[in-house]
Amino acid sequence: MVSKTEETQLNRLENQVDNGGGGAWEYLCLVRKLKVRRSEKVLKHGLSILNDPKKRSALGPEEWTLYEQVAIAAMDCQCLDVAKDCIKVLQKKFPESKRVGRLNGMLLEAKGSWAEAEKAYSSLLEDNSLDQIIHKRRIAMAKAQGNISEAIELLNKYLEIFMADHEAWREQAELYVSLQMYKQAAFCYEELILSQPTVPLYHLAYADVLYTLGGLENLQTAKKYYASTIDLTGGKNTRALFGICLCISAIAQVSKGRNKEDKESPELQSLAATALEKDYKQRAANKLGLLTCSLRSLKN
Amino acid sequence: MAADLKYEISQNAYIKLVLHALKHNTTAVNGILLGRVNPQNENVVEIIDSVHLFHSNLALLPPLEIALIMIEEHYGSQGLGIVGYFHANERFDDVELGIVAKNISDHICRYFPQAAVLLLDNKKLEAVPKGKCQSPVMQGLT
């Protein structure tokens, strides 16, 4: 997960490099640090450094890291020849390396030779069964072949060993959501909230999943988690504000036939609506009318 | 279906959807088609505009509900309604309309029975920059 400041910094650097202002190496390091997926840019700027012998030697030992980064970016852009060349260079320099073995496995994946890639990964896992990256590659392969249920199974096994891998829990939740298995997705978000209770993103996603599941209890819990998101973000999260309005309207609909419990304070609805209107006035004043109409149709 | 329905899609609507899919080329994306039935010929549905929706977590309800409410409000005032759904799959060789896309388009069909469902043909999209393919990169399925 990348913060907004980090993303702005990255985009600024990217613009600078794109327009010939230098700083390519800085950009590539930042991409590597933040683990974002900008393969076209990485390929372009990485190659410009690698193909220039002066720039390449200026990197010193970091040269090999760059070769690895460019190889992966090339595979992502389906430039398999570039990837193969980079891997060859790395193989020459580090002949017995597991890291290079991994890259070879990824190249097989990129070519679509799933069985061979699987063989390569299994043999690498025999030597080191706790290699997180290879486990993740196998999950990615299942996903790439469209076998989402197998991906989920493999990911479950991975999570049994590496329970603290938050990104993996998030990926699992998203896989479940894509198959509309919302209960299981909710479980994943619960794990995330338990281990990192102050990250608003998980509260928001959990609320979204609960709302999608539906039912009075889930809607009420969803409302609570939208509220906690608003709390954690200092009231700035538009999605959570909308979520509150949706929950209130849905709860009202579901409990129409039942005894009016009237635990719901009508203030919450108007508070959320006011906050949204303030937000829109600041950031998108011309859409304010649209907002008011939409909120009104929600109330009915 | 009674008579043969024809759909006309405006360049604006088409380009917006394809550009959105291109920008988020590593995830599935979806969008809503807006338009109306041709007032002169009720067998022709004109797709006049489109709104692209999401590029992550397409199967969650709250963002979808809000989006649909606002889209209906905004375009309703222009005399346009929701006439269809656009979907682009995450994987290159996936040519099927998945469960999520089916559910959303079924829902739209309930309100507008002649709704169109457009699925992006990734293989054709790849061929576009090479100038090989001029025909629209979507298949229509109703």
Image (tube, coloured by chain):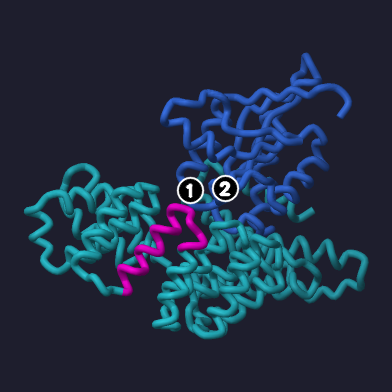
Chain colours: A cyan, B blue
Residue at the (56%, 61%) spot, across then down = A143
Question: In x, y percent, where is residue A208?
Answer: 65, 65
Comparing A218 with A130, the one in front is A130
Up the image or down, A239 lies above or below A185; here it is above
* Quadrant position of residue B5: top right
What's drawn in magenta, residue-wise?
A: A98-116
For the stretch drawn in magenta, the main secondary structure is helix
Q: Do callouts 1 and 2 point to residues on the same chain?
A: yes
Marks 1/2 in contact by CB < 8 Å: the verdict is yes
Residue at image mark 2: B29
Q: Is residue A150 left or right of residue A139?
A: right
Residue at the (51%, 50%) spot, across then down = A281
Residue A210 sits inside the magenta stretch:
no
Up the image or down, B32 lies above or below A182; here it is above
Residue at image mark 1: B24
Residue at the (53%, 41%) spot, across then down = A286
What is the secondary structure assignment of the residue under circle 2?
Answer: strand
Q: Residues within 10 Å of mark 2 (few under 14, many from 20)?
A: many
Residue A106 sits inside the magenta stretch:
yes
Q: Is residue B46 left or right of residue B130?
A: right
Q: Quadrant of the N terminus of chain A?
A: bottom left
Q: Which mark is residue A64?
A: none
Chain at tag 1: B
Question: In x, y percent, where is residue A49?
Answer: 17, 52
What is the secondary structure assignment of the residue under circle 1?
Answer: loop
Question: In x, y percent, where is residue A256?
Answer: 88, 64
